[in-house]
Image (cartoon, rainbow, N blue to C red):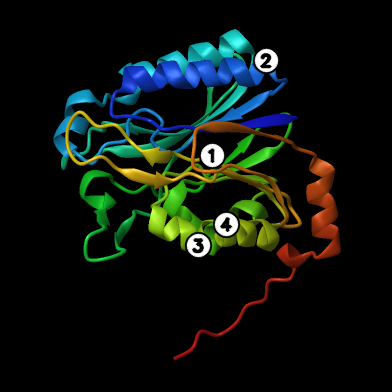
Amino acid sequence: MRAALLQINSSDDPGENLATVRAGMAQAAGEGAGFVLTPEVTNCVSASRAHQRAVLRHEGDDPVLAGLRDEAARLGLWLLIGSLALKTDDPDGRFANRSFVISPEGAIVARYDKIHMFDVAISETETYRESDGFRPGTRAVVAETPFARLGLSICYDLRFAHLYRALARAGAEVLTVPAAFSPVSGAAHWESLLRARAIETGCYVLAPAQCGTHRAREGKPRQTWGHALAIAPWGEVLARAGEAPCTLYVDLDRAEVDGARRRIPALTHDREFELPT
């Protein structure tokens, strides 16, 4: 299966972002891709909670989700929507950061809500409190497709190795890590963590990314690291983006997963141990 990882620069206008992704999907299909992946918050990159409340929708009436499902069906593609920011019915009004796997018929095959919230203070001037606006998910997800079993994750999840080990032990062969990574932590940690997750699990790791300075009608414009990556099960980088929008292509082969795991069968070597006191 040929996979296409879209690196894009989403604005805070969902309609504009839908048009961008549809064009990227069509181009990828023309290059022979059967599986397209988009980054985190494909529909809206915004630092303004007020703007998010004004433009975001519930899953059932979200035009970006509907449009991308239609485009997947029109092109006959498997699609990972890295995530959409969506309204929920939670009493506190927080949103969901939700990834979707879409079939070539346009059906939703799997959903995953980001578990780990990006609540950090990278510097005195760069802090994030994702949990103020988004509520965390509670369930890990592996999605079955004809070409691979996909272990779903989103961005900050990358720092929690136990999640990926659990996904691999549940059958995942490809780990998806769509992201809108901070430039500071991206420069320091992004590639190292992605390669580690591949090496630890013997999985492909596919990480489509947001990039650049994101145009905002309201609030402070966000910046993201870019540098989308595709990693092989043995840990080598198969494709690497820079800082600008682009598409990466990589051919997935289940035999590579089997080969890496035969060489070092670490997933079968877990042992119980006592915790330190």
The answer to whether residue 211 is left or right of residue 37 is left
Name which residue type carries label 2. Gly
Q: Position of residue 19 (x, y in %)?
A: 42, 15
Which mark is drawn over residue 30?
A: 2
- Disc 4 or 1, which lies upstream in sequence? 4
Q: Residue at x 20, y 41 (%)?
A: 220
- Mark 2 closeness class: few <14, some 14–19, many ≥20 residues within 10 Å: few
Q: Position of residue 116 (x, y in %)?
A: 39, 54
Whether pointer 1 and pointer 3 mark residues with C-beta atoms closer than 8 Å, the reply is no
Can the viewer see residue 69 in this picture? Answer: yes
Can residue 106 be seen by looking at this rendering? no
> Residues under labels 4 and 3: Cα distance?
6 Å
> Which badge, 1 or 3, is on the more N-terminal residue?
3
- Secondary structure of residue under mark 4: helix
Q: Which residue is mark 3?
A: 189
**Circle 2 — which element?**
helix
Mark 1 and mark 2 lie on one chain; the one further toward the N terminus is 2
Label 4 Cα neighbours within 10 Å, binned few <14 / some 14-19 / many ≥20: some
Amino acid carrying label 4: it is Glu
Near mark 1 (Cα within 10 A), the count class, few <14, some 14-19 or many ≥20, is: many
Q: Nearer the viewer, residue 74 or 111?
A: 74
Give the tally of numbered discs. 4
**Circle 1 sits on which residue?**
208
**What amino acid is found at the position of numbered circle 3 in the picture?**
His
**Callouts 4 and 3 close, C-beta under 8 Å:** yes
The image shows residue 212, relative to residue 42, as above or below, that is below
- In front of the other: 243 or 29: 243
| 203 in relation to 97, above or below | below
The label shown at residue 191 is 4
